[in-house]
Amino acid sequence: MQSLSRRRFTLGLAAASLAATGGLALSLRPGTRAVIVGGGPAGAEAALALRAAHPAASVLLVERDPTRLARGEGGAGAPFLRPRAGAGLAALKAAGVELVLDDVTGIDWSGGRLTLFSGRTLAFDRLLLAPGTAARDEAIPGLDAAARHAWPAAWGSEREARRLMARLEALPERGHVVLRLPAGEAAHPTAAVSRALALAGLVASRPGARLTVLDGTPDHRLARAFAAAVPARQRDRVAWIGADRGGLVRAVDARAGVLETDAGAIRADVVNFVPRLEAGAIARAAGLADDSGWCPCDDSGRSHLRAEATVLGDARKEALRTVAGALQSARLATGALA
């Protein structure tokens, strides 16, 4: 193992190279230890690409949730699971990627070490982060932990997806389902429209049931995309209320099943409450996110706030936030290291 002083010297050379070239044109020499944090599509793709391009380097992937590396789909919550793509556990192991199932709690940039939830530390020469997204705090009265449990987001969580599906299966005749999409720019526009379409399909199969979409985004792009894709026979079961028509949620009472909006009180039997999102916790803790909650980066993923950091996937400020966009971010970042 390298001594700490030598590691700092190596990191100093990396920083000097970045400053001189204005990019990430730093090859992974034999023995270089590259660590990727986050095992979603972008992180897994980056790990495979680095192994293929730099077989003599050490590539290690840190992921806290082992289910993210499982590629099988199905089960009760399948309609509400985000599509998976990229490499699974078997492919990563076969490629020689080292795997650590743990959570990163801190980054020592000058020393080149990660601190893990388990208490372990890991050394790195190059660090790429695919922190994904997390729910952002919203000042909505009544929106507490109990409300979030009763009204699952089912946005990347299989457990919540199963819980939402169970509630939908118990929907009474003439029941009312509400999908809440948060205020601000849609973090995953394709996924938001897909969610509305899935709920519309389920509602159409229940006698007299209906769906209301409370769309807090500032324009009508999601509504137009939904209208272009929803089957004609389902349209009369769906009411889409945009932000300009009162679709913003101001307060909630989960026990009573009531959402207070600018358009008035709306009562629901099932609520799919999608939260406002931002970059995952490790991105914020590492100083990679700005006031918007996202990570400003250049096209190759190099952070504008910390030049030695590369950010992959949905956490980037200008990300498309689709699976294809996440995979492309990994290819651009690892290509810049070639």
Image (cartoon, helix red, strand yellow):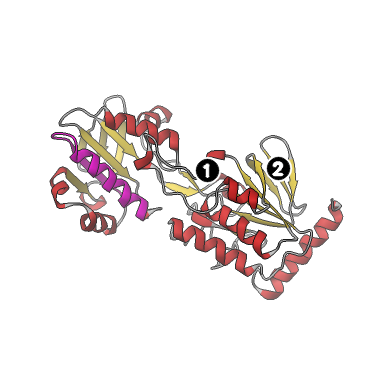
In primary-sequence order, the first of circles 1 and 2 is 1
Under mark 1, the amino acid is Arg
Please give the name of the residue rendered at 64% of the width and 51% of the height, measured from the top-left corner.
94
Q: Secondary structure at mark 1?
A: helix
Q: Nearer the viewer, residue 81 or 88?
A: 88
Please give the name of the residue rendered at 43% of the width and 29% of the height, measured from the top-left corner.
145
In the picture of the structure, the residue carrying the numbered disc 2 is 115
Residue 288 in view: yes
Residue 285 lies, in percent from the top left, at 61, 46
Under mark 2, the amino acid is Thr
Please give the name of the residue rendered at 62% of the width and 55% of the height, measured from the top-left corner.
47
Image quadrant of residue 151? top left
Residue 198 lies, in percent from the top left, at 28, 45
Residue 110 higher or lower than 301, as above or below: above
In the picture of the structure, the residue carrying the numbered disc 1 is 68
Residue 172 higher or lower than 200, as above or below: above
Q: Secondary structure at mark 2?
A: strand
Instruction: Give the side of residue 41 with respect to residue 115, left or right.
Output: left
Q: Nearer the viewer, mark 1 or mark 2?
A: 1
Callout 1: 10 Å neighbours few (<14), some, many (20+)? some
Q: CA distance from mark 1 to mark 2?
A: 21 Å
Whether residue 151 is in magenta: the answer is no
Residue 319 in view: no
Residue 176 lies, in percent from the top left, at 20, 34
Segment colored magenta: 190-216
